[in-house]
Image (spheres, helix red, strand yellow):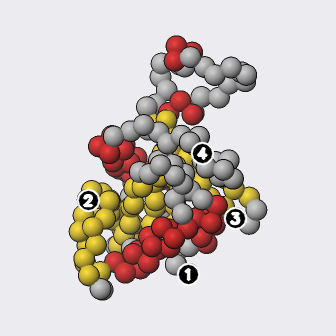
């Protein structure tokens, strides 16, 4: 159930998904998004040595830009009952710096608190809310739709990439057929602040 005062972008209830389905879908989106990048690879459940020890991470993406410069992306998948807090995103930021990742992306089944979104945006960390694919279907009805009312070709799952700049929050939908928001995020590599 949605927490009181939770931002409107968070789902009422986290999507019902097994850890295997969740990770498989995230890996699929990452592979599709990186299809046009040089030397692109995705690793799942990887151990990486940082300057102060070894880290177990959910995912690791590598690709090349500008004639051979390697870009590393830390991928974290959070499957919880409540929105991800700012402290978790601060931890992801610190972990990325520790292991030498130039970019980070966090997926969550329950959304993100406002402070997490604000910090992630300032640190160029991508946030994706992992939702039921039915949320991609919009109607103007007072009554909830029955299962039979949904088109048969809806995806099982979708992502909502959330960004914040000042007082403007944007949400872009990600599905197997609409991977551009994620693919576009991979392209610009900004220096971390």
Q: Which mark is residue 165?
A: 3
**Between disc 4 and disc 1, whose residue precedes?**
4
Would you identify the image quadrant in which residue 117 lies? bottom right
Q: Position of residue 73 (x, y in %)?
A: 39, 66
From the image, state whether disc 4 or disc 1 is nearer to you.
Answer: 4
Q: Please give the residue where the numbered disc 2 appears in the rendered image.
A: 45
State the residue at coordinates (42%, 37%): 16
Quadrant where the image shows the C terminus: bottom right
State the residue at coordinates (56%, 42%): 1
Would you identify the image quadrant in which residue 61 lies? bottom left
Q: Which mark is residue 49?
A: none
Q: CA distance from mark 2 to mark 4?
A: 29 Å
State the residue at coordinates (50%, 33%): 133
Q: CA distance from mark 4 to mark 1?
A: 32 Å
Callout 4 crowding tier (Cα within 10 Å): few <14, some 14–19, many ≥20? some
93 to 167, vertically: above or below: below
Q: Is residue 115 visible?
A: yes
**Between disc 2 and disc 4, whose residue precedes?**
4
Q: Position of residue 67 (x, y in %)?
A: 37, 72
**Between disc 1 and disc 2, whose residue precedes?**
2
Tell me the SS state at disc 4: loop
**Between disc 3 and disc 2, whose residue precedes?**
2
Callout 1 crowding tier (Cα within 10 Å): few <14, some 14–19, many ≥20? few
Q: Is residue 153 left or right of residue 146?
A: left
Q: Position of residue 30 (x, y in %)?
A: 39, 51
Q: CA distance from mark 4 to mark 3?
A: 24 Å
167 to 155, vertically: above or below: below
From the image, state whether disc 4 or disc 3 is nearer to you.
Answer: 4
Callout 3 crowding tier (Cα within 10 Å): few <14, some 14–19, many ≥20? few
Q: Which mark is residue 193?
A: 1
Q: Please give the residue where the numbered disc 4 appears in the rendered image.
A: 2
Q: Position of residue 150 (x, y in %)?
A: 54, 19
């Amino acid at each position: 159930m949605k927490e009181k005062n939770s931002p409107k972008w968070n789902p009422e209830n986290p999507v019902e998904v097994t850890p295997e389905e969740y990770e498989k879908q995230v890996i699929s989106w990452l592979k599709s998004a990186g299809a046009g990048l040089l030397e692109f690879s995705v690793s799942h459940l990887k151990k990486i040595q940082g300057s102060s020890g070894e880290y177990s991470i959910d995912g690791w993406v590598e690709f090349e830009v500008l004639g051979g410069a390697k870009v590393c992306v830390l991928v974290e998948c959070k499957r919880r009952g409540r929105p991800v807090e700012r402290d978790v995103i601060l931890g992801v930021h610190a972990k990325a710096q520790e292991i030498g990742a130039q970019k980070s992306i966090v997926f969550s089944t329950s959304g993100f608190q406002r402070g997490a979104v604000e910090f992630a945006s300032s640190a160029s960390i991508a946030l994706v809310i992992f939702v039921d694919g039915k949320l991609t279907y919009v109607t103007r009805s007072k009554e909830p739709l029955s299962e039979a009312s949904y088109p048969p070709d809806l995806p099982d799952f979708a992502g909502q990439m959330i960004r914040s700049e000042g007082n403007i929050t944007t949400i872009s939908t990600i599905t197997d057929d609409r991977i551009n928001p994620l693919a576009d995020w991979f392209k610009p590599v900004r220096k971390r602040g």
